Amino acid sequence: MSVEGWTYLMVSVTFFVYLYIGWWARVRDTKGFYVAGQGVPPLANGAATAADWMSAASFISMAGIISTLGYDGSIYLMGWTGGYVLLALLLAPFLRKFGKYTVPDFVGDRYYSRTARLVAVVCAVFVSVTYVAGQMRGVGIVFSRFLQVDITHGVIIGMVIVAFFAVLGGMKGITWTQVAQYGVLIVAYLIPAVAIAWMLTGNPLPQLAFTTSDIVERLNQIQVDLGFAEYTEPFANKPMQDVLFITIALMVGTAGLPHVIVRFYTVPNVRAARYSAFWALLFIALLYTTAPALAAFARYNLIEKLHDKPLTEVRELDWVKKWESTGLLVFEDKDGDGRVSLDADPARSEVTIDKDIIVLSTPEVANLAPWVIALVAAGGLAAALSTASGLLLVISSSIAHDFYYRLINPKASEKQRVLIGRIMIVFAISVAGWFGIHPMGFVAQVVAFAFGLAAASFFPVIVLGIFDKRTNRAGAIVGMSSGLIFTTGYITANKFFGMQPWWGLSAEGIGTLGMIINFVATFVVSRLTAPPPQEIQDMVEAIRLPDHAGPAAILDEESEEFH
């Protein structure tokens, strides 16, 4: 069977499974729609969290950027992994004890302010739309290659499928679908990594093949011969301060991502939240420890297969023809010698490879079996679909629950709230799809913008809201607004208006400076204005201390009054 035949089969089977699970777990009430009825077991929630966490950026793009940048590409690996640990240990148990559905819920009640809730809604929507735009780009790339359509039609197909999953089952359906999607994506990631490790080094364990063989030394030498820096040379592609700022932004941005935080609300209690965090970290580690190895193998294989080979022969390769048709792989015989040249100087290099196709193309470049190539396509779709669905639920809940129900129509029925939520999903996926067709960068880069926005807006007010009783609503409003406005302005000016980076800081790393601005503004304004009411300070104690009742005991959700 051909690659396309295997792809249609595997994608169809996996989609049928997802559809069945979504239909089986469909919901009609808000608790099921937003937090899966808070009845998900820790092991299942760990797998769902891992799938939610390992988006198209992790599956499709992370190894690609490491493969391209070498040592400097590890910022994504360090930032995202460290960020999850930070979230699991520092924030998740306390937020789960608070017992609300969403991050704006926490902000609105902790800072006793409708304005603070509204600002948090804006931040959540802004972060989530940016993030889901990256997922739409990833879905579009997969469909573009394996359905042989252009990237625009690939994104549109992905929009329809993602919207269907999110609208149908809400958080309950998404959670159980994500459990299945984790199984698909991790198998799809590990099988080609194991196969290529065995082919290149004779060791089937990618992690050991990467660290104990001479593959990295060989790759370093090849890079030097072609005029590149050594693959393992630090700060060859990015200045040190930018590497530091991007890593911090990704790390603290993780701890402020609303679609990941909400996963800890879907379990029965705080103890289950801690166990699900452990399982998620284990499941995430399986992919994240494999990514550096796969990145090096992919880089080595691409150079070996393309450099100094006759251009006519290269263009006859099946995988080259199909990726060329997408416009994501381009050859240009600049010197007219009829041979492919890879060179550190862009003026002499005759191959342009989109970073986002490296993982998807690696099984084909390595001549693996067609079913393996198809499995990787199914895995990439699973990664993008799982995260996009979770992000759309955040957008939906932020607008339908925190804005419409809390601020506009407190008497809205459950049916009305779920309907508004589903309408918002369709609207959000349309906006994200437009950015997927007209991206600000490659998938991991777009996702990094979302992390920077989360770092600059949510992280400081969540941390101070849990650990500092003196932080008040005025501080939170000024802090979130200033962090978000500064970071958004910098990214926009840098990406669309040609502004030169400050101090060598890229748009991906500016969220760290935005976070610092937020922290300072929140802390200073809180100290210059009246302290929170005593009941709010008591609530903060209740969140932090295990021997207190949770805030659910003192908070009336419907009236938003503390007792």
Image: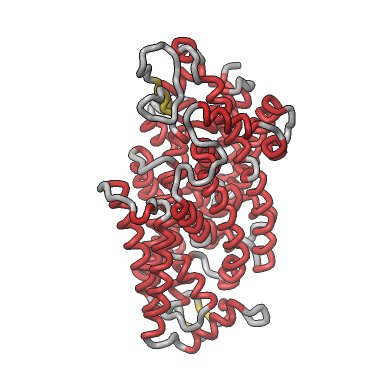
Could you tell me if residue 8 is visible in this image?
no
On the image, the x and y values in percent for residue 457 come to: 41, 64
Instruction: Identify which residue is drawn at 58% across, 56% down.
Output: 82
On the image, the x and y values in percent for residue 514 come to: 39, 63
Could you tell me if residue 207 is visible in this image?
yes
Q: How is the image coloured?
A: secondary structure
Closer-to-camera residue (450/541): 450
Closer-to-camera residue (49/468): 468
Which image quadrant for residue 205? top right
Q: Is residue 522 left or right of residue 370?
A: left
Question: Which quadrant does the N terminus fall into?
Answer: top right
On the image, the x and y values in percent for residue 152 come to: 36, 32
Which image quadrant for residue 539? bottom right
Closer-to-camera residue (408/434): 434
44 over 313 or under it: above or below: below
Closer-to-camera residue (57/403): 57
Q: Across the whole image, how many numbered discs are drawn on residues? A: 0
Instruction: Identify which residue is drawn at 36% across, 56% down.
Output: 503
Instruction: Identify which residue is drawn at 39% across, 77% down.
Output: 475
On the image, the x and y values in percent for residue 352 come to: 41, 27
Instruction: Identify which residue is drawn at 65% across, 53% down.
Output: 280
Q: Is residue 246 left or right of residue 51?
A: left
418 over 329 or under it: above or below: below
